[in-house]
Amino acid sequence: MLKKLGVLFFVIVMVLSTASCSFLKTKNPTNVEKKSVQKPSVNVKTNSSVASNNGKDNSAKNTSNDVSDTKITENNTVNSNVYSNSLINAQGLDNTLYGWGMRVLPDHKTPEITSKAMSLIKKYDGIFTGDTTKKYVYLTFDEGYENGYTPKILDILKVNDVKAAFFVTGPYIKEHGDLVKRMVSEGHIVGNHTVNHPSLPKLSDEKVKTEITGLAEMFKELTGKDMHYLRPPMGEYSERTLYIAKSLGYKTVFWSLALADWQPLPGGPDESYNTVMARIHPGAVILLHAVSKDDTMALDRILKDIKAQGYVFKTLDDISQ
């Protein structure tokens, strides 16, 4: 009899213990396993027969006649909780990352770009040349940061009666608002180079929009003006980012003539001058970096000799009309 009572007592204790544990778990809803969020993997695919310019014109170094076809493809099989809204907003458009590149041709002919790049430019109202049937040229500068040369550049442009487009970033507007105001007051276009100069295809839709609209708001607050042109940082773009830019009212501006002027040129100002004059062509959109001492020292001669060859400097607004 005592043995049976002992077994019964053990069973009762076990039942009460189980009920108590269940109650405690129910009263602690925070005791939930956290799931890790996976970021999209990035696969780099590079055609070894061509050279990427990473958004810069490396043709001064690259003597190959191949058009750059380097691309980075993002794997879109990502956590739906993180990116579902972005993919829907961009209508599931291709996000293959392309670096802007071209084949430089002799005899002042228009450089060639890939058929894919051309189709995307046409589809999303991008610009890489102006009117190639006339001797019109379009001068643009990228202003990621100030290196002390922009005041001199503005002086030279004023003396030569040339209007240009300056693509600026967020830190530039914050630190050099006086120069931005001068650009506007002297009739130059100020374009959008994003707030933080990121590779746009690597960002979500919302972050791409924030990079673009954030800079536009800074510019509007400083000058009261709107922005209409975007130059993607490093020349990196995708169909998705071109679509977003267009949906925000921007024309994405690339270039057809550039050189490796973000660093000192081995040949100094003469190399800057000779490269521009050798590659100038009808409809050329010229990209120079305002951080370049070599470009600044060669600029007056470049402008005068381009005009002497019968070219007329136009603005990006003339392309858009």
Image (cartoon, rainbow, N blue to C red):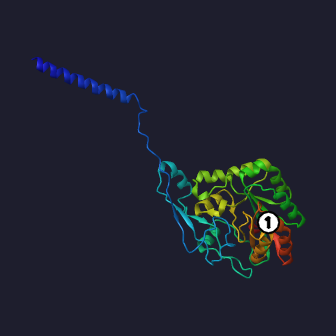
Displayed quadrant of residue 21: top left
Mark 1 residue type:
Asp
Frontmost residue, 122 versus 186: 186
Position of residue 317 relative to residue 310, above or below, is: above
Would you call the spot at circle 1 few (<14 residues within 10 Å), some (14-19), or many (20 or more)? Answer: many
Q: Which residue is mark 1?
A: 294
The quarter of the picture where the C terminus appears is bottom right
| Residue name at image x 56 percent, y 66 percent | 71
Q: Is residue 241 left or right of residue 143?
A: left
In the current view of this chain or complex, which residue is farthest to the left?
1
Position of residue 224 relative to residue 275, above or below, is: above
x and y percentages locating residue 311 in the rendered image = 82, 75
| Residue name at image x 71 percent, y 77 percent | 110
Q: Secondary structure at mark 1?
A: helix
x and y percentages locating residue 56 in the rendered image = 67, 66
The quarter of the picture where the N terminus appears is top left
In the current view of this chain or complex, which residue is farthest to the right?
159
Displayed quadrant of residue 4: top left
| Residue name at image x 66 percent, y 52 percent | 211
Displayed quadrant of residue 115: bottom right
x and y percentages locating residue 258 in the rendered image = 72, 69
Q: Is residue 79 left or right of residue 269?
A: left
x and y percentages locating residue 117 in the rendered image = 61, 70
Frontmost residue, 47 versus 229: 47
| Residue name at image x 76 percent, y 60 percent | 291
